[in-house]
Amino acid sequence: MRKTTVLGLAAAIAAVAAQAKADEPSATITGVEDRALRETIQRALTQSDAPPASRSEARRRARDAANAAVAVLRAEGYYAYVVDPDVTETDPPRGTVKVTPGQLFVIADPRIDWSGAPPDEGVRERAFSVLGLTEGAAGRAAEILGAEGRAVAQVQKLGYADAMADPREVIVDHADHTVRPTFVIAAGDLVKVDGVELSTKGRTRIEWLQRLAPWKEGDVYDPEDIAELERRLRDTGVYDTVSVALAPKDKATPEGLRPIQVTLADRASRTLELGAGYSTSEGPGVDAKWIRYNRLRRADTTTITTRVAKLEKSLEGSVALPHWGRPQQTLKLTSRVFADTTDAYDETGATLSADLTRRLQTTRYRTYGLSVDLSQTQERTTANGLPVGQRLNLATFTALGAYAWDYSDNILDPRRGWRVEARAEPTAITGETSLVYIRTQAQGSAYIPFGKEADTVLAGRLKLGAMLGGTMPEVPASRRFYSGGGGSVRGYSYQAIGPRLSDNTPQGGLSLFEGSIELRHRFTQQWGGVVFIDAGAVGTEPTPNTRDFSVGAGFGVRYDLGFGPIRADIAFPLEKREGDAAFQIYLSIGQSF
């Protein structure tokens, strides 16, 4: 036992010694009192895995360290430095560098000179204003280089696309310890743009592309317009690569206008996507998507989706037309046939819908829509105090208004940020019953990371719903709110939360509340785990009351596939009622919310 301990201790000492040797700097820095400056110099030194083998090698390392120190000092604004490399008399010898930084040099009298014809006075003033050099501030090299880059970029943004920096003049005055930069910029000519030229052959119509440009023929060049056209094309999702650039001078038209050249590489015209999920209450489900890109030659996407599951069978076709009518606006036309088989109702039917979604900002969306639904529903209701079945043939007309914010960092595996969506759906039903009401719903989620790598995330979700003008049981069962299942309150089967008829059939309701708290932790790059509590309530009044609440709790594992996690959860109902299983298992892709 003692021999094992000694060997283990020796191995530990050897490992520590090896680490210390690997971390040895090329030389020791002395004489620098400013801690931040000293640490910056030390970071610039090379590391050696062994001490110098001779005095000449130690001297070489000291000279290299001195050169590195000089580079740092000049970059930080110290030009009156004294740097003295030396070698110790120890065995083995070590390199040392004594540094005397001297006085800090400061910025004075920054100027811009123009090479060739200068731009107009407004452009000159804007270029100077973005230098950002304050007289009396440290004369750091990085600040001077950054100022030059900002000035050139500003001139380009104001229409001088060919503006470039000529060699600058920087006077380091040791008499008054100042740095006096003079930037020399060749502005060139003011550039006005022509239309769009498509440089590649593909499936995109040039007429549609020209309408997408955010400028008019003869407008002054603005690099933001070029970047915006590139963003609009990338946002469609139908191209592998997109490049948008100003044509060179020799491509100018006789009127002096410069075209904008667009290069597009189409992604594969067709893709097939397959998906699957499972839960103990909802059973297995499989999805298949066939997607066709740019069939109409205007960056459109055609999707045919089929789903086969225990609760739902459907076939859906949709066409998405990006930048429809105006930029950042997508029209989506959808047709769907379906057959739903649930504990609360059975429904078959067909739906036609049109949604118009406008992206107001990068993470903010507004949607308006219309749909018509023809369906036959078999549901249970109460007659003379007893549950009875009834069949309804209905036509449902629905309008949609929705607003969404998404400030999360990932669709399938968010670690920080938040999401909010609110929607209202005025609905008119006709057929074997007639009814008008407004279905409203709002949902929000937030994600708070902990740790440098955000390995731990506290996630929360809140969902509220209410029907204004609807009454029970006049609202058809297929249009009511339900809760329970993998997407709402885990631990309960689909539709299990809320009021039930005397035969235990879920009744659904006119109001909804759901909330979730989930703690997620990533143990390795691929594996993670979660614990969670979900709660939900469905009420027959416009607001649910406290006696309707049901709570579930559980835990799960996550395996990261690279694009998102596979999740496996097991959850237990804490408010178990007749017919509820002891637990539920859920398998799917992506976090639960």
Image: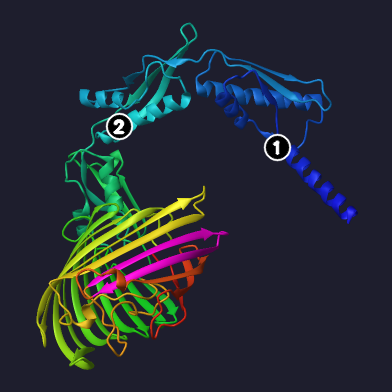
Locate the N terminus and report the quarter of the image it occupies. Answer: bottom right
- Please report the residue visible at 30 percent of the width from the left and 87 percent of the height from the top: 505
How many neighbours does mark 2 have within 10 angstroms: few (below 14), some (14-19), or many (20 or more)? many
- Residue 437 visible, this angle: yes
Amino acid identity at mark 2: Gln
Quadrant in which residue 321 is drawn: bottom left
Q: Report how many numbered discs are placed on residues in the image.
A: 2
Residue 278 disc label: none
Does 532 appear in magenta? yes
Would you say residue 519 sits in the magenta stretch?
yes
Give the dominant element type of the magenta stretch: helix, strand or loop.
strand
Q: Earlier in the sequence, mark 2 or mark 1?
A: 1
Q: Is residue 238 left or right of residue 68?
A: left
The residue closer to the viewer here, 335 or 6, is 6
At 31% from the left and 34% from the top, the residue drawn is 162
Q: Residue at x 27, y 42 (%)?
A: 224
Mark 1, residue position: 23
Residue at the right extreme, as displayed: 3
Q: Secondary structure at mark 2?
A: helix
Q: State which quadrant residue 533 falls in.
A: bottom left
Q: Marks 2 and 1, how far apart in space?
A: 45 Å
Viewer-closest of 349 and 155: 349
Quadrant housing residue 468? bottom left
- The magenta span reads 511-539
For residue 154, the mark is 2
Give x and y (percent) for residue 200. 32, 57
Q: Amino acid at mark 1?
A: Asp
- Across and down, in percent, residue 313 comes to 32, 85
User: Quick check: 113 above or below 447?
Assistant: above
Can you give x and y, in whole percent of width and height, for residue 465 in the image?
24, 67
Residue 72, compared with residue 225, is above or below; it is above
Tag 1 secondary structure: loop
